Image (cartoon, rainbow, N blue to C red):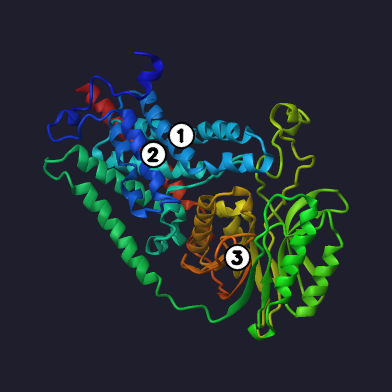
Amino acid sequence: MSQSESIITDSAHPPQHAANRHSFPRVSAVRLALLSALLLWLSHSPAKLFPVAYIALAPLLISLTRARKFWQAFGRAYLCGLVFMGMTCYWIGLTIVGYTGSQIGWLAWLVLMPILALYYGLWGSVAWRLSRNLTDGGRILAYAATWVVVEWLRTLGSLSMPWAQLSYSQYLFTPALQWIDVTGAYGLSFLIVLMNGGVAYWVLHRGEEQSTRWVWLAGTATLLVCLTGTMKMLLPHAPQVLKVAITQGNFPMKGGSDLLPSVFETVQRMTRAVKPSDKVDLVVWSESTLPLVSYPRFASQMTAIAKEIRTPILSGAQTRNDKTGAENNSALLFGIDGTTSQYDKQHLVPFGEYIPYRKSWPDSIAGKSGFDFFPTDLTPGTASQTLSYSKDGMSTPVTFGVLICYEGTYPPLATASALQGANILFSLSNDAWSQSHSQREQHLASIVMRAAETRRDIVRSTNNGISCVVDAQGRIAAQSPTDTETTLTYNAEIRSGLTPYVRFGDWFVALCALVALLLFRKGEKLRKARTKT
């Protein structure tokens, strides 16, 4: 047997329970990993079969339980992650091909997917190592705890991509989201893995006494979370609201600098069309609507429009610092009194807004791929910064937190705004570049999680969809049709107070890391005890 085959195939000496006549048929490790990948994909967009998530990992867990070597566990989990992420993020290749006109997009997809799959391989191998000497309940707990830690690791670093996290599959199942204001979305991922562990145990031990005990325990916990979550959804509404008009101009990503003035004219026209009888408190434009680097005169026009309609305007913008020359992806708030405040995007998209290790790349690879790097990197913002303005009838200003596009996938950016006093969050995005409705829904799933974690309404404006308002319970309260020019008006709630997750951050991740360490020590003690006997 070759080295590559030994990584993923079953050992000739299966665990004792595998020989039981009631155990799961000897399906190959490859097929089990591929089945889990398919089920995980079905639980996310575009299929959105969210109940499938609670059994999706069971085939892989069965395969990991049978593994006899560290690299077998790594290979099986890696294969699952590779296929799942490859099918889920196909839009990466589609996007780059559409944007550059070059097949280099599919090369980028082929390179990135094996890198993302490393996290799954890491989880599988570490979880297997921790659990190999534990009893069944300890093994299931080890799988869930290590999953949470690895999901958290996926959010670290400027090159990270915490996309399609396990909990995000539940973004349309609102009752399950109501406790993530305590644990963060990681708590929901933990619960889903526990359920999968219970299912895997039952399949492996069918016909044995108490074979259903772990699936019943995990199922009961899941049911309690959903029932109590339903009760939490009955919380009273906030007494004060901010009436927003969300513009969706339906303009494409490509088109060059010649398109920018027409984009500005389109959204300007939509803004002026907002009726005074609507009594709107704020007009919201999407990411990058204001190309102030190319057309700085638009800034004074924005101030004039805000004064004309007697309503502040929040817009995404491309800006340049006159002192340093740094270019930023920003959000600007234009007040009716002529004042302007600014937030600069902190977490930039690699190869979309800056080139990592630019000096190591050739100035142009156009001769090989037809793709030219953009000449100037954007500069990230240095800190979270809230924006605010005084609303008529309120004794204190309304404070905003802004998440620009990809920032919505990072929980600390949303919680930092809430800690700084944000009463409401805004998500400004440009999803036209993806050329995929699946990507838009996958992106929206992360925004839903941020709303439920912080207990803040999130107002989302995009250039072509999905524009919406997500309420503090994580429900999509209002939504515009995609790929249409439209203005959505809605009363978003103004909230205060801090959730446990906002106050204490990723305490649940730290707890899972501690549990994993304790389980490892327990497993080592059991191993030594068996060795002595």
Name the residue beneath numbered marker 2. 37
What's the distance in space between the residues labelled 2 and 3, CA to CA?
34 Å
Of residues 87 and 390, which is closer to you in this image?
87
Q: Is residue 441 visible in the rendered structure shown here? A: yes
The residue located at (52%, 41%) in the rendering is: 90
The residue located at (81%, 71%) in the rendering is: 303
- Which numbered dot is residue 425? 3
Residue type indicated by callout 1:
Leu
Question: What secondary structure is found at the residue carrying circle 1?
Answer: helix
**Mark 1 vs 2: CB contact within 8 A:** yes
**Residue 108 image offset from top left, x and y in percent:** 60, 34
Please tell me which of labels 2 and 3 falls first in the chain.
Answer: 2
**Mark 2 vs 3: CB contact within 8 A:** no
Residue type indicated by callout 3:
Leu
Looking at the image, residue 305 lies above or below residue 129: below
**Residue 435 image offset from top left, x and y in percent:** 59, 49
Q: Is residue 378 left or right of residue 108?
A: right
Question: What secondary structure is found at the residue carrying circle 2?
Answer: helix
What's the distance in space between the residues labelled 1 and 2, CA to CA?
8 Å
Q: In which quarter of the image is the C terminus?
A: top left
Looking at the image, residue 251 lies above or below residue 528: below
Mark whose residue sits in front, 1 or 3: 1
Name the residue beneath numbered marker 1. 82
The residue located at (38%, 22%) in the rendering is: 7
**Mark 1 vs 3: CB contact within 8 A:** no
The residue located at (44%, 58%) in the rendering is: 171
